[in-house]
Image (cartoon, rainbow, N blue to C red):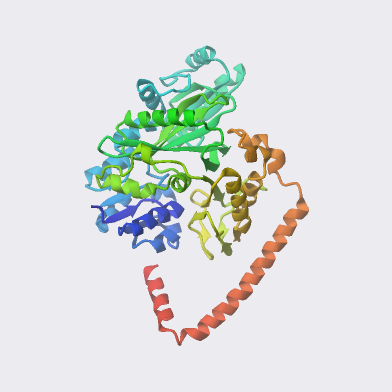
């Protein structure tokens, strides 16, 4: 059985995986770049290994460095988290060759579902509904024009190896075809080293709904219901919730069956997510599969009552699933928001810097997955997400009210964050009613833009006042600590251990 896991990631997801390791009595090992020497995941782990300079392509994305660290600490397994190498088939294959368990699916599954054109073919063979479009990459512009005329405008041009909104172009008019296809191919080549693109019919009023699946190595596969992920900005998710406010029991059952069929089509094992695009009439189509743990997995855990990381580890240990489909149900409602170090009132400009003060939200039904702390300097090299805030309540209305309360209590001083923007989302009528799609942010600018300058100034003054008060208390506490330290051997010991570990 797995006794030591190296977490090939950083930030909040690394800490989250390590927490489950600690619950299971498994030792966790952190890896860190130069910029992450003082990161929380390094402090939380049982051991930590330096893997390179700050840029991710010189550290977290270097397979040899990760494998070398795993060998040094005699890790039985590697958990990739999400992002970085989590959906890299070469990494999964390398782990297998080195005799290290990769906590995730096979390289075959990653390869197959990572290429969207290949995935479309697999889904068609498994009778999973897919968006009308091409099943082969577009080779030249004349072919693209002919295909678009056949499908009919509007269409989406997508990178076959894409993700995160890169290599995507919406084409609404005839005169946009040439420039749109060319731009998508160029962006795909720059981002993924592969300029293959395909074309799909564009769905009006699209809803982004995904199903969590879990499969073992014995042929068992279940789904853990849906997540609504339609609040997006530049194709990046901002708010997720479960259950979806537009879902019906009948459609949920059918989509769940197709999600399981999609996973079985590639002999999938571990946790994964089947993403669907859904129209206003609840017609749904396969979009893609994420062959890893999702950022928004905590809301599923809260509503269904299953620790997905624990199940991933159990599957990696070769154990059969502990649950059957009939054992699972949805209980209550959960919402997650992503907190970014960005200034929402200045076109979401990045806001790296030192965290001067943080007050985490507490109380009934609140979960906070983060990695920053007072005095920590947020590096500029990585994704600016600093935490995830998750709430649960018996019903959707109460969950929204609870999220508003939690966001009100969440204070981070020293950097700009998206907390005010997220709070405004909770008050938008369309969101409150559950009547929104992926156009939500652009359709509700009147509610999301700040118009009251006086209100902003008042909040800035309140933040400054709070910070001054914090510094005053900190100075007093430091003085008291220095005075008492000579009488307290355990405090001296604690300081010594802290310095040694860093």
Where the C terminus falls, by quadrant? bottom left
Q: Is residue 285 left or right of residue 441?
A: left
What residue appears at the point 50 percent right and 48 percent down from the top-left corner? 383
Residue that sits furthest to the bottom in the current view: 487
Q: Is residue 43 left or right of residue 96?
A: right
Residue 292, image quadrant: top left
Q: Is residue 92 above or below residue 342?
A: above
Instruction: From the top left corner, tell me how far across and down residue 264 is, in percent.
Output: 32, 31
User: In the image shown, does 387 or 495 lie closer to the viewer?
Assistant: 387
Q: How many marks?
A: 0
User: Is residue 147 visible to us here?
Assistant: yes
Q: Is residue 448 left or right of residue 282?
A: right
Instruction: From the top left corner, tell me how far across and down residue 345 is, in percent.
Output: 67, 48
Instruction: From the top left corner, tell me how far across and down residue 308 is, in percent.
Output: 38, 47
User: In the image shown, does 214 or 61 lie closer to the viewer?
Assistant: 214
Q: Is residue 133 above or below residue 481?
A: above
What residue appears at the point 50 percent right and 29 percent down from the top-left corner? 277
Residue 6, image quadrant: bottom left
Residue 152, image quadrant: top right
Q: Is residue 398 above or below residue 273?
A: below
User: In the image shown, does 371 or 34 lie closer to the viewer?
Assistant: 371
Instruction: From the top left corner, tell me how far across and down residue 92 is, in percent.
Output: 30, 42
What residue appears at the point 56 percent right and 24 percent down from the top-left corner? 281
What residue appears at the point 43 percent right and 23 percent down from the top-left corner? 129
User: Is residue 29 visible to us here?
Assistant: no
């Amino acid at each position: 059985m797995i006794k030591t896991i190296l977490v090939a990631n950083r930030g909040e997801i690394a800490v989250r995986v390590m927490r489950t390791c600690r619950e299971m009595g498994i030792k966790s090992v952190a890896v860190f770049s130069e910029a992450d020497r003082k990161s929380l995941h390094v402090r939380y782990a049982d051991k930590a290994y330096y893997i390179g300079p700050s840029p991710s392509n010189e550290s977290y994305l270097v397979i040899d460095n990760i494998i070398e660290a795993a060998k040094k600490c005699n890790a039985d397994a590697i958990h990739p988290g999400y992002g970085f190498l989590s959906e890299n088939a070469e990494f999964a294959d390398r782990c297998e060759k080195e005799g290290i368990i990769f906590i995730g699916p096979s390289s075959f599954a990653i390869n197959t579902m990572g290429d969207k054109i290949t995935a479309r073919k697999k889904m068609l063979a498994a009778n999973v509904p897919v968006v009308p479009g091409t099943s082969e990459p577009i080779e030249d512009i004349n072919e693209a024009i002919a295909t678009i005329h056949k499908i009919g405008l509007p269409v989406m041009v997508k990178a076959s190896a894409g993700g995160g909104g890169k290599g995507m172009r919406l084409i609404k008019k005839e005169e946009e075809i040439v420039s749109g296809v060319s731009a998508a191919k160029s962006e795909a080549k720059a981002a993924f080293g592969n300029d293959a693109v395909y074309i799909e019919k564009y769905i009006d009023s699209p809803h982004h709904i995904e199903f969590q699946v879990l499969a073992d190595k014995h042929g068992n596969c279940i789904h853990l219901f849906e997540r609504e992920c339609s609040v997006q900005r530049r194709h990046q998710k901002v708010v997720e919730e479960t259950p979806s406010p537009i879902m019906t029991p009948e459609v949920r059952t059918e989509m769940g069956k197709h999600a399981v069929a999609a996973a079985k089509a590639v002999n999938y094992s571990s946790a994964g997510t089947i993403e669907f695009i859904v129209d206003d009439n609840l017609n749904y189509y396969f979009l893609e599969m994420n062959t890893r743990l999702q950022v928004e997995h905590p809301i599923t855990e809260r509503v269904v009552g299953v620790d997905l990381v624990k199940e991933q580890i159990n599957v990696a240990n070769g154990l059969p699933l502990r649950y059957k489909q009939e054992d699972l149900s949805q209980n209550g409602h959960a919402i997650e928001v992503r907190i970014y170090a960005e200034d929402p009132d200045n076109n979401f400009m990045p806001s790296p810097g030192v965290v001067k003060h943080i007050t985490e939200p507490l109380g009934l039904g609140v979960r906070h997955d983060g990695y920053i702390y007072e005095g920590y300097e947020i590096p500029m090299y990585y994704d600016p997400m600093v935490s995830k805030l998750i709430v649960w309540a018996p019903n959707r209305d109460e969950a929204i009210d609870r999220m508003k309360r939690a966001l009100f209590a969440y204070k981070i001083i020293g950097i700009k964050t998206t907390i005010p923007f997220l709070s405004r989302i909770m008050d938008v009528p369309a969101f409150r009613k559950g009547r929104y799609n992926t156009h939500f942010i652009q359709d509700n600018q009147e509610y999301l833009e700040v118009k009251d300058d006086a209100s902003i100034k008042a909040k800035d003054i309140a933040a400054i006042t709070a910070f001054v008060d914090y510094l005053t208390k900190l100075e007093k506490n430091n003085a008291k600590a220095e005075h008492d330290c000579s009488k307290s051997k355990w405090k001296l010991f604690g300081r010594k251990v802290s310095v040694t570990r860093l």
